[in-house]
Image: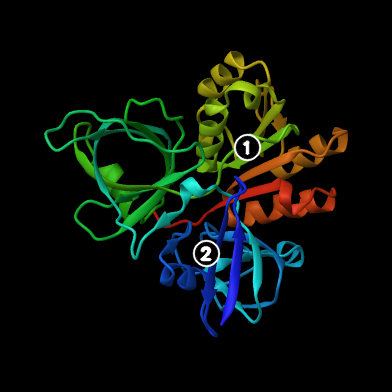
Amino acid sequence: MYTIRATLEDGEDLAFDCREGEDVLTAALRGNIILMSECHKGICTTCKALCNEGDFELGPGVNVYSLPPEDQEEGYTLLCQTYPTSDLELELPYGLDMVTFGSSKVETIHDVALIKLDHWTPNVAGLLLEARDAVGRPIPFEFRPGQYVNIRVPGTDEWRSFSMANSPDGSGHVELMVRLLDDGLFSNYLRNHARVGMMLEMKGPFGTFGLQESSSRPRLFVAGSTGLAPMVSMLRGMQGDAGMVPSKLVFGMRNKEYFFYASELAALSARNWHVELELALEEGHDGWTGRVGNVADALENILESNTQSPDVYICGPAAMVQRIEEICHGRGIPSGQIYTEKFLASG
């Protein structure tokens, strides 16, 4: 039997026992402590934590996308794939308010109305949902900028995950960006069946991806495709001292046909003098005033001129996230200043 001690972001501590051959998440649950998690397969990285002391073996679910070698070298692990071989001292990237105590976690299913549906490009749609009570009245829906929800594909038992693009304002609104895949279940539903006024089922919020408000370092937000959503949510939600930190959003797409949300990003930057936009197209065109190239190229140029090591937030396809992480590590940015959310295509 091993002792697992975990220090949370707010300074609170947790302790529980872990059996031989048992993963840390399961051990915590056995002790009536429900830590942040989602897939339990080593994919989503919601349970990512830093191990400051102790030894463990990694389970078979870990791969180079969910836990790159650089992160492993610095002591990061995924708790659902962490099998202790000694006592462990862990550091968790969230506070006690995100921990649930009990033998099981009850997941509430929210009824939400589709109040707006826009097909921005051939492969990206925008949804605006509104949480409703049992008699159809709008109700608040609380979440933290950077988190995501799961939406049931109507008529199936399949769920799809999407990050919020709005910031919580008590209205019950949930704005989502959906990448449309050729044969995706939810993609086909949006193309062929969805209509304003229809009801959907939603679970959440989930995830630990979010703004580190206590940091005063400059912030770089790097997004590809619909990975833009949580970045916009965080930028919209920056308030007080956290909102005064110089921030730059790096966002890129292949060409103008697939570029979306341009006017909303311009408005966001205009309202917040500390937010700078760096937009990129891999295929430039006449009249394009942004950068020609991909987000990795743009980031390389930005980091060359930076005099202070920034906090970097990355969201997008797994391969893109890995490439951006490699660039950051190559520039000497510690893993503790790199925050990632990987999107896995499911449609």
Categorize mark 1 by other alpha carbons within 10 Å: few (<14), some (14-19), many (20+): many
| In the image, residue 308 above or below residue 184 | above
Residue occupying the point 51% across, 40% down: 146
| Render colour scheme | rainbow
Up the image or down, 70 lies above or below 304; here it is: below
Tally of marks: 2
Q: Position of residue 229 (x, y in %)?
A: 50, 37
Quadrant in which the C terminus is drawn: bottom left
Disc sitting over residue 335 in the figure? none
Residue type, mark 1 in image:
Gly
> What is the quadrant of residue 112 in the picture?
top left
Task: Give the position of the N terminus as an image quadrant.
Answer: bottom right
Q: Earlier in the sequence, mark 1 or mark 2?
A: 2
Question: Where does residue 220 sit, x and y in percent of width and height?
Answer: 70, 36
Q: Is residue 37 left or right of residue 231?
A: left
Q: Give SS at disc 2.
A: loop
Q: Position of residue 321 (x, y in %)?
A: 64, 52
Circle 1 is placed at which residue position?
Answer: 252
Asked whether 116 or 242 is in front, the reply is 242
Mark 2 crowd level (few <14, some 14–19, many ≥20, 10 Å Cα): many
What residue lies at 30% left-to-right and 43% top-to-bottom?
191
Question: Could you tell whether 114 is left or right of 250 in the image?
Answer: left
Residue 43 image label: 2
